[in-house]
Structure formats: structure tokens, C-alpha cells
Image (spheres, rainbow, N blue to C red):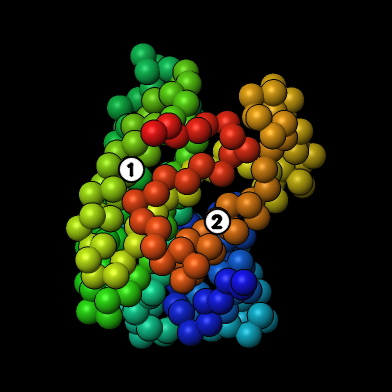
């Protein structure tokens, strides 16, 4: 059994970020051509584009503010002109901010999380799903978080945005499922990324004690889950919130 994305075009938002780079490389290794979205990290996007091309895949990079409709429409035009209409959409981008208590958190942080979590998913659906409906095929995969189930102190703005996108995506899964399109979410725990490896901060003992498997996961674990959901191996899976966090959270029935 093999994950084969040959002939597919994927777009990854926030592809120049820590998780985005590994997700993009993994989709390319599985055979997909890549549209690499970035907002500010052009140098990282260029490096990623070159890596994808070395794998024998086509690749393009596009700068865009994915919280604005006109920018997402321009993003689609660029992807379609350089590659094709995407078969796989991975909504990974998120606005970073300093976490504080509800009483201390600025209102602008709640607004930024709404825009980068909820509005991103709405706009990407509005712009990219119509072509999927015409083809009767598509995969939408959004990156959520275990925090959406934890609700720990200082997580409120982040959780509000991620729980909001969860609602939008569950409704979307029902609305576009009849067209052969799946909509799923991958919810990472506190994963070990390239930054952690460079700074030697892989071990986080207090967090690891809360994980049933006893350790932090790797960024590759998230990319593997995304690749699976993007493939035909997952063609009958939709509406899923999939924690990839070593059991740190466990959705109940």
C-alpha cells in the first residue's frame, strides 16, 4: 500500500513555516506538484521551491494575504496559470501572537485569529472549491490544534479561532461531500520542528508527562497524516478532526 499523489496539484498555505515546509516536501515526495504560498518568508519559500523541483515535481511560489478575498483570488489565478487548479488544498497558515490571559489579551489578537483561522478557510473554499465541484474531486485539509480540546490558560484567542474553523469545516464537509470532495482536519500537538532541533529544545518534560505515549511527536508525523488524507486511501473519510498528539487529547463518542 503506497500513498501516490502523482498527477495531483497541491497548494499549501503558510508553506514556508515550520510545519508547512515538511508538509510540502512530503506531498512532493508522494508525487504532487506544489503551489507554495507564503506571506513574508520569501527566502524560505524560494529554498522550498528549489527542493521540490529537485524531487522532480513542478513548483511555484506565491505571496498572498490569505485573509483577503482579492488576494486569494489572485493566488488562484497564479496557481492555475503556472500549474493547474489544485486537487489538494492544505490550509496551514496562521498568524502568530503572544499568548496572554483573557483579561490581558488584546482584542486585535482575537480578530487576527478569526481572520487567519476562520476566514482563511472560508475564502480558500469560496475560491478553490468551485473547480473541485466541476471535476467532482478534491481534498481540503486544514491544520487545527490539540489546544482546541485542551482550553488551557492563555490559549483563548488561538482556541477561539481554531474552534471556529472546526465549525466551518464540518459544515463544509456536509455541503460539498456529494461532489466527491473530502474535508478533514489534522490537529497537531506540540511537535518537534526544525527550529527545536536547531535550538536543542526537543525535550519538554512537563509537556511530555501529559502525553500518553510519553514524548513529543515530529513534524513529519503531521505531514504523514496530511499525505494520507490527501490520498485515495482516505477517499471515504470526511468531516474528521484527527489529533496527532500521542494521545494528549482523545475525542469521545
Residue contact between numbered discs 2 and 1, judged by CB atoms under 8 Å:
no
Structural crowding at the residue carrying mark 1, measured as other residues with C-alpha within 10 Å and reported as few (<14), some (14–19) or many (≥20): many
Taking the spot 76% from the left edge, 33% from the top edge, the residue there is 203
Q: Residue at x 68, y 48 (%)?
A: 218
Give coordinates of residue 61: x percent, y percent. 48, 73
Nearest the eye: 98 or 204: 204
Q: Position of residue 145 (x, y in %)?
A: 47, 39
Q: Residue at x 77, y 47 (%)?
A: 198
On screen, residue 147 versus residue 206, left or right, reads left
In percent of the image, x 23 and y 49: which residue is there?
Answer: 171
Q: Quick one: quadrant of the N terminus?
A: bottom right
Disc 1 designates what residue? 166
- Tell me the quarter of the picture where residue 55 sits: bottom right
Q: Which residue is mark 2?
A: 225
Earlier sequence position, callout 2 versus callout 1: 1
Where is residue 114 shown, x and y percent of the image? 30, 40
* Picture layout, residue 217 above or below residue 148: below
Q: Which mark is residue 180?
A: none
Give the spatial CA distance, label 2 vs label 1.
17 Å
Q: Secondary structure at mark 2?
A: helix
Percent coordinates x, y for residue 124 in the rendering: 30, 61
Residue 38 visible, this orientation: no
Give the quarter of the figure containing the C terminus: top left
Amino acid at each position: 500500500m503506497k500513498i501516490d499523489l502523482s498527477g495531483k496539484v497541491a497548494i499549501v498555505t503558510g508553506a514556508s513555516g515550520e510545519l508547512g515546509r515538511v508538509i510540502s516536501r512530503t506531498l512532493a515526495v508522494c508525487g504532487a506538484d506544489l503551489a507554495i504560498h507564503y506571506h513574508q518568508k520569501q527566502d524560505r519559500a524560494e529554498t522550498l521551491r528549489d527542493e521540490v523541483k529537485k524531487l522532480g515535481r513542478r513548483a511555484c511560489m506565491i505571496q498572498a494575504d490569505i485573509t483577503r478575498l482579492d488576494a486569494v483570488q489572485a493566488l488562484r489565478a497564479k496557481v492555475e496559470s503556472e500549474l493547474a487548479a489544485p486537487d489538494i488544498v492544505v490550509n496551514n497558515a496562521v498568524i502568530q501572537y503572544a499568548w496572554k490571559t483573557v483579561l490581558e489579551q488584546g482584542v486585535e489578537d482575537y480578530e487576527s485569529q478569526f481572520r487567519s483561522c476562520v476566514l482563511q478557510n472560508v475564502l480558500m473554499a469560496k475560491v478553490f472549491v468551485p473547480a473541485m465541484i466541476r471535476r467532482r474531486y478534491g481534498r481540503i485539509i486544514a491544520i487545527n490544534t490539540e489546544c482546541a480540546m485542551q482550553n488551557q490558560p492563555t490559549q483563548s484567542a488561538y482556541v477561539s479561532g481554531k474552534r471556529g474553523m472546526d465549525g466551518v469545516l464540518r459544515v463544509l464537509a456536509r455541503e460539498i461531500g456529494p461532489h466527491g470532495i473530502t474535508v478533514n482536519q489534522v490537529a497537531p500537538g506540540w511537535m518537534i520542528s526544525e527550529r527545536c532541533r536547531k535550538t536543542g529544545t526537543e525535550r519538554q518534560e512537563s509537556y511530555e508527562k501529559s502525553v500518553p505515549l510519553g514524548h513529543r511527536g515530529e513534524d513529519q508525523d503531521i505531514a504523514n497524516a496530511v499525505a494520507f488524507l490527501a490520498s485515495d486511501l482516505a477517499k471515504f473519510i470526511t468531516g474528521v478532526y484527527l489529533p496527532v498528539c500521542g494521545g494528549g487529547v482523545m475525542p469521545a463518542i
